[in-house]
Image (spheres, coloured by chain):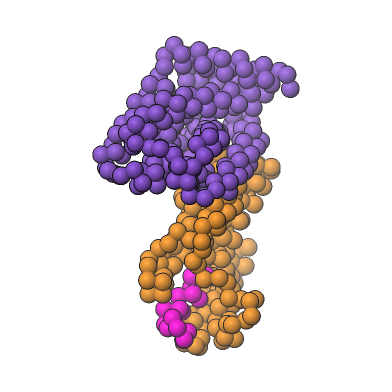
Amino acid sequence: MKRAFTILSVLTALLLVYALYQALVVAPTERTMGEVQRIFYYHVPNAWTAFCLFLVNLLASVAYLITKKVKADALAVASAEVGVIFCTIVLVTGPIWARPVWGIWWTWDVRLTTTLVLWLIYVAYLVLRRFSDSAQTPVLAAVLAIFGALDVPLVYFSIWFFRTQHPQPVMGKGGSLDPQMLHAFLINLLAFSCFGAMVCWARYRLEMLHREVDELHALESLAGSESAKPSMPLQRSSR
Amino acid sequence: MNSLWDLTLATLVKDIRLEWRSKDALNAMIFFSLLVVVIFSFSFDPNAEESRQIAGGLIWVAFLFASVVALNQTWARELRNQVLDAYRVSPAPPNSLFLAKALGNFLFVLILEAVMTPLFIVFYNLRALGPTWQLIPVGILGTWALVVNGTFFAALSLRTRSREIMLPLLLFPISIPAVQGMVEATRIILAADGSARFWIVLLITYDVVFTTACLGLFGTILQAE
């Protein structure tokens, strides 16, 4: 387990370096947008990773409601937290690109708005987990995750009814993308997917260790042994 | 099925009787939304055409904020004297309790709307240019959309710290498509700016999806231990 994590970390580091080189040096400069287009190699893979992590969160939440396994809940926490970080990066890099290209920082377009609402829902999810430290927290959080997942398609359609300004996906439609650009993009996609998986894995292990420590503290205080340090808190205040 | 409705009705009648005697939620909601409307009309000073464009947004935001007042009281009442624990151990289906609470809140918010809408029309000199009768289905569907999720999230945040802050934090992000539906439909009807059909269909979809989800998951929330 530990060795697999080390291998993944090394692989991620190498991939990220190679991907950065590809995106900044090898890929040709876009004709109309210029250098600012290079943010695309960073923005889209981050969005992809964030959405994957939210999907993992949903699956883990459903799995938790069915099986009540602690591991599923720990995975749900980890994927939600890391997903919010990646989603934040997407919401920050988007406007940086939009300002020179569209001339505006933000527009209420379908993808932007859906991403923002998804971010809001998952921040609410994390706030719920932070504000509730009882034993029912995992169940409540899992239920909220399901509500969020039901909400996203509705948000998408309600905004889609307005006009949309976001650039349409360029892949698969006539293939107007330069092969070197595509290569740089795919490498970045892979690198950021690995990076997301690595961070999520690390957070998951941390969460499992936290729970183990909590459990040991609880057992210790139950046993009431003299050797147990009385100053140790029974439970972490935040989860 | 019969007993589900009987139990729902019994709980609903109890809640209405309690509300009738105290009028806590209704008074608080009406006064609160009155304040919101007055503050809005000081903040914006629109002419007739502008007010048609923004009135939908203002009125629904006022109702959304005001309904949170009632929703927060829904379950807090049952915590006193461990009534909720009694529900939990009773053989009554959890959904009858949920339906009763949701219907009760629905009724209270509808009363609020019935009182506030005329005031709103007076304050903003509103005159609808589109088919006015369509505001009734929009009002009913929109209110149910707010109330069904609101009742559910009020139950969900019951066991959290500072639950009164928790409810809007959970409810508002999930309600975004519903709020957009209500506001857009109201604006279109007031300004006669095309057809509100898409938004009414969106509200129906939202109501069906989330009513199903609430009924499917309420037992889990109530029994979560």
Magenta region includes residue B145: no
Question: What residue sits 54% from the left and 46% below the top?
Answer: B196
Quarter holding the C terminus of chain B is: top right
Residue A118 lies, in percent from the top left, at 51, 53
Which chain is purple in the picture? B
Nearer the observer, A184 or B131: B131
Looking at this rendering, what residue extends furthest in the right direction? B1
Question: What residue sits 34% from the left and 43% below the top?
Answer: B48
Compared with B39, A173 (above or below) is below
Looking at this rendering, what residue extends furthest in the front direction? B129
Q: From which residue to which does the magenta span run?
A: A29-44
Q: Is residue A233 left or right of residue A54?
A: left
Looking at this rendering, what residue extends furthest in the left direction? B42
Q: Colour of chain A?
A: orange
Compared with A101, A227 (above or below) is above
Nearer the observer, A170 or A49: A170
Question: What residue sits 38% from the left and 66% below the top?
Answer: A105
Q: Is residue A188 left or right of residue B7?
A: left
Q: Is residue A154 left or right of residue B67?
A: right
Residue B26 lies, in percent from the top left, at 42, 22
Residue A112 lies, in percent from the top left, at 48, 61
Magenta region includes residue A41: yes
Q: Is any part of residue A167 visible from this angle?
A: yes
Quarter holding the N terminus of chain B is: top right
Helix, strand or loop for the magenta stretch, by majority = helix
